Amino acid sequence: MDTITWPQKTRELHSNHFESTVWNDFQFRDDDIIIGTYAKSGTTWIQQIISQLIFNGQVGLPVAEMSPWLDLRVPPAHVKLEGLEAQTHRRFVKTHLPIDALVYSPKAKYIYIARDGRDVLWSLYNHHSTANEKWYGALNDTPGLVGPPIGKPNDSILEYYHQWLDQDGFPWWSFWENIKSWWDQRHLPNMMLLNFASLKKDLAGEIRGIANFLDISIDEAQWNNILEHCSFDYMKENATASVPLGGIFWEGGAKTFIHKGENGRWRDVLSEEDAQKYEQLAEEKLGTACAHWLKTGEI
């Protein structure tokens, strides 16, 4: 039997969002679930699905509170770690770090969800352009900021798109290294790759696949409820429980955070040349196989 080479943490990331050292103090349990994504790639959707599987279709679950973004700078690390240590249910935590900036445990199960970068960018722009002063204050005016503060976005989503590509994820973080770092470890026995496009195409099948990977037996009597509670319409209508702090950081609240849930909105704005710029970069930065999977969900 081949010996497994587990990913090792090789660096720390600090920025207006990240504080990766928190992972050094996280005490893993044997059944922990770690949700990895870039951002705006279906993170909240996967959190909702996992909560429904663990809690067998219950309504009113405070998913955002139960499943914190561990490497976000705020609130302080000790607050999140103490909260997670006090949890008695199966824990599910999210991260937006590349895999080499967190601690990877053979004990845990890792689910990484990705999405075509053009769709990610359209959701990021909504997230950023509707953020209010509370959001900017939480990121820019709290202790631990590394690098420049994050500013308000340009009024043009087209300019925002080109800036994001030209400056490798600015003003967020690198899209390409995040995707590739997880893709390169896809062979690990405790990792599952998911794609936003696949969830849109076959939500029921993908949920059953997630349950199988997590060793969760589905209660068929609750299946219709689970499926309904994982639908976009249900999550939009009940967004407050799924969104950090109930959506107080965005104009319009939680329903602004859970915005469209659609792919392809960029087609009405980007020229063929603009769209091809992304395609060429994806091929260059990720390789043919990964770029194809990212676009289509097909491996």
Image: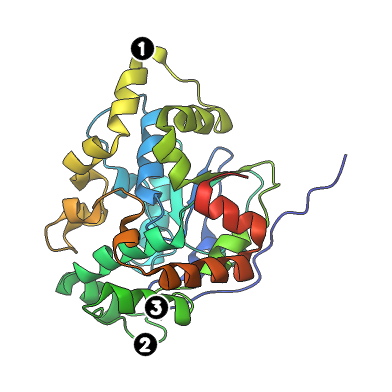
Q: Is residue 41 above or below residue 77?
A: above
Marks 3/1: CA–CA distance: 48 Å
Residue sitting at x 57%, y 51%: 293
Rendered location of residue 82, percent (x, y): 39, 54
Near mark 1 (Cα within 10 A), the count class, few <14, some 14-19 or many ≥20, is few
Q: Quadrant of the N terminus?
A: top right
Name the residue that disc number 3 marks: 162
- Choose the circle earlier in sequence order: 3 or 1: 3
Foreground label between 3 and 2:
3
CA gap between label 3 and label 2 equals 20 Å
Mark 3 / mark 2, whichever is N-terminal: 2
Q: Amino acid at mark 1?
A: Ala
How far apart are labels 2 and 1 at the CA level? 52 Å
Of helix, strand and loop, which one carries label 2?
Answer: loop
Q: Which residue is mark 1?
A: 221
**Position of 124 relative to 258 (above/below):** below
Residue behind mark 2 = 148
Q: Among all residues in the image, which is located at the extreme bottom?
A: 148
Name the amino acid, label 2: Pro
Question: How is the model colour-coded?
Answer: rainbow
**Could you tell me which residue is drawn at 35 percent across and 48 percent down?**
44
The reply, left or right, for residue 242 in relation to residue 4 is: left
Mark 3 Cα-neighbour bin, 10 Å: few <14, some 14–19, many ≥20: some
